[in-house]
Image (tube, rainbow, N blue to C red):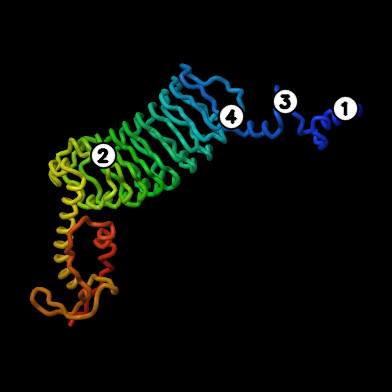
Amino acid sequence: MRDMGEKRRHGHGHGHGHGHGHLVGFGVGGVGHAEHEEKRMEPKKLDMSSMSMDTLPHLTTPLGNITTLDLSNNNLQSIPESIIARLLNVVVLDVRSNQLKSLPNSIGCLSKLKVLNVSGNLLQELPATIEECRALEELNANFNQLTRLPDTLGFELHGLRRLSVNSNKLAYLPSSTSHMTALRSLDARLNRLRALPDGLENLGGLEALNVSQNFQYLRELPYGIGLLVSLRELDVSYNSIAALPDSMGCLTKLARFSAAGNPLVCPPMDVVEQSLDAMRAYLSARMNGTAKAKKKSWVPKLVKYSTFSAGMMTPGRTKVNGSSTDGLHMSDYRSLDGGGIASPGFLSMLSPRRLFSPRRNSTKH
């Protein structure tokens, strides 16, 4: 009791009359409670980079307090599952430039992970559990031996802003890539890409796309690339692309473009090298001209087979192949004259989903 009384008096004397013993200064220099709490909450970085480690030593540090772990530039061949599983508050994990052949499945426990750098290893695939890292904003897996990415990667990593997978052996990007709607930068150069994923136009915020140096494997670009309305940088150099999609005439924000090293015929390389405006004008003119030709060829066929939707047609009689038949014709058909660069809105007019409705049989007499 005497000791407790002394502690109370001691605490009261340092608490400036408030009687709260837990506010007593402690530690070297008398650091206050509030200051200690603030320091305790500071992000903690554990830097074990460039230590020539083949294996991780026993770690006595409370891994739950670590927010940044740097294990880069070592000779690590594996990382224990148990260590990764305890990094519950890690935000940045850097294991680049090691000898890793696989990542632990427990990486899916890192619910707060925002930046993951696994570049410069020997990875042939990423664990499917990486999809559980839903806070991930940046994934760098350059310079590995990846032959595929998890098929459903894009369905879960909705917040991913930067995806870098250059210098691997990828033949395709997963179709779920088109669901990464927060993506701002996609770097897939120096692979073996044979095609880009369908639905690429869903990446409306994409600003930089690099699919250069896929050499003989990449022979064409999807038409939807012209709907990437935020695209500022596009590099498709050193592939086997003979024609750029006409839709690229819509890329009005494009500021940097390279198509060197392709057997381009359309547009001719001299047009591409002239300026971006010249290339856009060339492709826009082609798109408008092609659209008019297609529209004119569609009309008699669509009238004959009654494939217009109710909102686009009115009952009537139309001459098909010289004879008058009952059918439906467009009430507001307009020519597509008018120059200028085509817009994404114009492209949507030509979407088959918009032009075609389920086929209905016309009345026979």
Q: Residue at the location (49% across, 20% down)? A: 55
The mark that comes first in sequence, 2 or 1, is 1
Q: Disc 4 or disc 1, which is closer to the eye?
A: 1
Taking the image as shown, residue 24 lies to the left or right of residue 115, namely: right
Where is mark 3, residue-wise? 30
The mark that comes first in sequence, 3 or 1, is 1
Where is mark 2, residue-wise? 235
Q: Residue at the location (44% across, 36% down)? A: 127
Few, some or many C-alpha atoms within 10 Å of disc 4 (few <14, some 14-19, many ≥20)?
A: some
Taking the image as shown, residue 202 lies to the left or right of residue 327, namely: right
Q: Disc 3 or disc 2, which is closer to the eye?
A: 3
| SS at badge 4 | helix
Where is mark 4, residue-wise? 63
Question: Which residue is farthest left?
Answer: 322
For badge 3, the amino acid type reads Gly
What separation in Å lies between label 2 and label 1 (alpha carbons)?
75 Å
Q: Disc 3 or disc 1, which is closer to the eye?
A: 3
The mark that comes first in sequence, 3 or 4, is 3
Q: Position of residue 251 (x, y in %)?
A: 26, 50
What separation in Å lies between label 4 and label 1 (alpha carbons)?
38 Å
Q: Position of residue 19 (x, y in %)?
A: 83, 36
Q: Nearer the viewer, residue 296 or 173?
A: 296
Where is mark 1, residue-wise? 6
